[in-house]
């Protein structure tokens, strides 16, 4: 506990959150790449040829993306400026997380049962839902739902707790999550389910807020890049030389030591490098939740038609080109879908922006342009919107 004693009690001065939208735009493409390569890594492991090592490298290098989504969600949701009204917060999340969770769970149960596993009578959709992971990417919504329920209580840390207490709580939750994953994956003790799947990720959620306003020095940037590259290298080697007939699963897990270090490093580096500019990524971000929801419906049929690659060029296509193709298709579909009132809700866009606020009165006709309130003017391209107007902070991931 000695290092914690050197941490001050006051929160750091707030910094801009403009970097978070382009960061999430990049992260969703990395999530698509993980799913594009997952079967390749598993199926090509037996040969341990150059194609597998390339797939392993790209897969390992993309693993930071999901924890960073969780950290950004926590950084925004635990902000004391968001207020302390649990009813208001939770009612908004019913629209932005709850409705998509229910709808897309039904969609993917049908997709899995009748497209991926048409001959498997032993698969039980009810049990799949009770695991909290009915399809490859949907566990993330179940994680967000659990974290959302506890957010009003976690927010007491940022409102009333010292920074030392916030650090300690985040690290304890992260350590518990890492131990839980080690026990369940390596020693086959226990298994996550619909009621507990979010708990191992709570450490990332809290540390997202704790680290949100950390500004790296030049030395810190260099050390973060070394930590990021080194942790990815450890994951690559560990996955390749671990025991078993298939790739050693634990180093790929989001709470394995290598991925934890890579994720925290990526979070800090994204904050440092993406604070200004990136107009295209700011434009793309509002459709990233649709990419998260839709991409398996596009990815699996196309990949099944193409077949799994067995050469290095083929792996590069699935690691770089195809994730971009899948993303573009999903962006176009989402762009069209959110224009339809009855469909918007299943993409997290159906609810009122602020269900408990009163309408803002119109400014007087004589008001000059320079006197327009900040809340009524159109934001600049790189300007972060206020929390109550922003898209759901965590409704994307893998």
Image (cartoon, grey):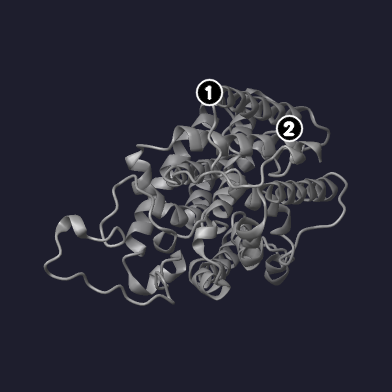
Label drawn at residue 239? 2
- Residue at coordinates 81% horizontally, 41% vertically from top-left? 1
Q: Position of residue 94 (x, y in %)?
A: 53, 72
Q: Secondary structure at mark 1?
A: helix
State whether residue 364 is above or below residue 244. below
Q: Nearer the viewer, residue 89 or 292?
A: 89
On the picture, is 89 further left or further right than 373?
Answer: right
Q: Nearer the viewer, residue 290 or 311?
A: 290
- Residue at coordinates 62% horizontally, 29% vertically from top-left? 228
Q: Quadrant of residue 222?
A: top right
Q: Nearer the viewer, residue 319 or 4?
A: 4
State whether residue 96 is above or below residue 201. below
Q: Nearer the viewer, residue 114 or 392?
A: 392
Kindly identify which residue carries mark 1.
Answer: 218
State whether residue 320 is above or below residue 119. above
Q: Position of residue 210 (x, y in %)?
A: 62, 47
Label 2 CA crowd tier, 10 Å (few <14, some 14–19, many 20+): many
On the picture, is 223 further left or further right than 4?
Answer: left
């Amino acid at each position: 506990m000695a290092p914690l004693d050197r941490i001050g009690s006051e929160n750091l001065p707030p910094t801009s959150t403009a970097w978070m939208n382009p960061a999430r735009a990049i992260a969703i493409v990395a999530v698509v790449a993980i799913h594009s390569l997952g079967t390749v890594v598993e199926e090509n492991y037996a040969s341990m040829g150059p194609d597998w090592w390339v797939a392993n490298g790209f897969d390992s290098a993309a693993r930071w993306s999901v924890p960073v989504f969780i950290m950004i969600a926590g950084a925004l949701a635990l902000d004391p400026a968001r207020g302390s009204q649990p009813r208001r917060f939770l009612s908004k999340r019913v629209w932005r997380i709850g409705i998509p969770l229910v709808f897309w769970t039904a969609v993917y149960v049908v997709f899995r049962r009748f497209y991926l596993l048409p001959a498997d009578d032993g698969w039980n959709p009810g049990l799949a839902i009770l695991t909290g992971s009915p399809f490859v990417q949907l566990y993330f919504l179940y994680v967000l739902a659990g974290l959302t329920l506890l957010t009003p209580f976690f927010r007491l840390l940022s409102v009333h707790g010292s920074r030392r207490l916030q650090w300690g709580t985040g690290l304890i939750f992260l350590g518990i999550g890492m131990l839980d994953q080690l026990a369940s994956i390596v020693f086959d003790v226990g298994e996550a389910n619909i009621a507990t799947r979010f708990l191992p990720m709570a450490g990332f959620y809290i540390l997202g807020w704790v680290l949100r306003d950390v500004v790296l020095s030049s030395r810190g940037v260099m050390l973060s890049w070394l930590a990021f590259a080194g942790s990815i290298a450890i994951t690559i080697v560990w996955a390749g030389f671990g025991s078993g007939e298939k790739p050693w699963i634990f180093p790929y897990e989001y709470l394995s030591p290598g991925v934890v270090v890579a994720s925290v490093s990526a979070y800090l580096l994204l904050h440092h490098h993406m604070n200004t500019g990136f107009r295209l990524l700011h434009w793309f971000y509002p459709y990233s939740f649709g990419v998260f929801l839709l991409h398996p419906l596009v990815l699996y049929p196309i990949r099944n038609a193409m077949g799994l690659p067995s050469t290095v060029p083929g792996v590069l296509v699935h690691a770089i080109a195809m994730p971009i193709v899948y993303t573009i298709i999903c962006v176009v579909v989402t762009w069209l879908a959110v224009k339809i009132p009855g469909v918007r809700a299943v993409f997290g866009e159906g609810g009122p922006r602020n269900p408990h606020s009163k309408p803002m009165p119109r400014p007087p006709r004589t008001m000059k342009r320079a006197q327009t309130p900040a809340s009524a003017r159109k934001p600049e391209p790189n300007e972060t919107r206020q929390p109550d107007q922003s898209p759901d902070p965590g409704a994307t991931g893998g």
